[in-house]
Amino acid sequence: MRKEKVLIVDEVHASMAEGLRALGYEVVERTDISASEIPVSLATFQGLLIRSKTKLTAEVLAHAPDLRFIARAGAGLDLIDLDYCASKNIAVFSANEGNKDAVAEHVAGQLLVLAHKLNTADAEVREGVWRREANRGWEISGKTIGIIGYGNMGRAFAQRLRGFDVNILAYDKYRPADEHPASLQDIFDQADIVSLHVPLTDETRRMVNEEFLGQFKKPIVLLNSSRGPISPLAPLLAAMQSGKLKGLALDVLPNEKLSTWTAEEKALFDALKSFPSTVFSPHVAGWTTESYAKINQVLLEKIKAHFKR
């Protein structure tokens, strides 16, 4: 019997191809493939593995009549037309469980950097500046932390926070939290720190706008490791300038192709980064040495279970 074929178009850990072959698939690795080549190449494949650079629209997927599954080596599925996949009975797998620990540790680290001014203190000492009072931090202990989105990432972050003696408020519109349950209004009323762990959808795009930020009763520290378009830069800047935001940590940006920034995008970011109470990283919260392999393990188990291979 002819083997089913899987196309890998993004660079992933070597264990992915090895694992797929162990499940009986023929694997073709084309990490050098261009976006324009993908539709034509898909015609003869039953499986497709992507990471974060490949967008799969209905138009692209229409070229894959035999496709049975798409595996996303990561968490977000916003690059895939899920409605089309459902209509064609194409299974879609993500690996949220594989990088939840990485995300949780990264966000906790960014919060500690902001609280204890480690970014400014480090930069100053490197320049021979020794300012103790100016780098006096504040403690996380005793603060109220609102977690919006309580799936794998949100739960993992909450687990890391428990040792800090904080009050956790967890809100998830679609999967109400069974621990630390709270309403969004509770978070608006009580939170000192807010961490976003929601997927990018039509509902969450531009969720963090002037109206959203204006509902908090206290100035907050905001952490976003989800997706950049959830928190556009203009309202973040306005909130930093007004004092509504007293700290900001972003692992994601609305436009992560920095070479394509407009003058307006650059001006917004330059203004934001001028605040010492900001921390940025290049969408690497879930990208650790360990998660690189864990993601594959999760995907392989899901493929194996779904197709009973």
Image (cartoon, helix red, strand yellow):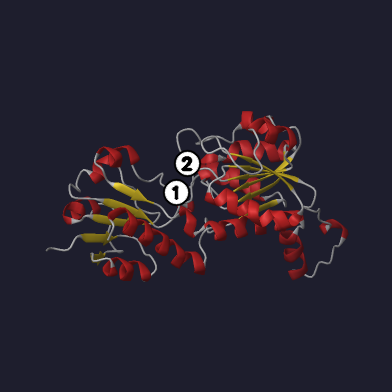
Residue nearest the observer in this picture, 214 or 187: 187
Give the answer, above or below, for where 181 lies relative to 118: above
Residue 212 coordinates in the image, percent (x, y): 63, 31
Residue nearest the observer in this picture, 208 or 66: 66
**Category of crowding for the residue at label 1, using alpha-carbon neighbours closer than 10 angstroms: few (below 14), some (14–19), many (at least 20):** some
> Which image quadrant is residue 57 in?
top left
**Category of crowding for the residue at label 2, using alpha-carbon neighbours closer than 10 angstroms: few (below 14), some (14–19), many (at least 20):** some
The residue lying furthest to the left in this view is 1
Residue nearest the observer in this picture, 91 or 51: 91
Q: Which residue is mark 1?
A: 76
The residue lying furthest to the right in this view is 133
Give the answer, above or below, for where 304 lies relative to 158: below
Asked if the residues shown at circle 1 and circle 2 are in contact, with their CB atoms under 8 angstroms apart, the answer is yes
Q: Which mark is residue 265?
A: none
> Which image quadrant is residue 123 in?
bottom right
Give the answer, above or below, for where 124 lies relative to 198: below
Which quarter of the image is occupied by the N terminus?
bottom left
Which quarter of the image is occupied by the C terminus?
bottom left
Q: Which residue is mark 2?
A: 200
At x 48% / y 46%, what residue is drawn? 255
Number of marks present in the image shown = 2
Q: Is residue 231 left or right of residue 95?
A: right
At x 27% / y 69%, what residue is drawn? 21
Q: Amino acid at mark 1?
A: Gly
At x 51% / y 36%, what residue is drawn? 174
Q: Amino acid at mark 2?
A: Leu
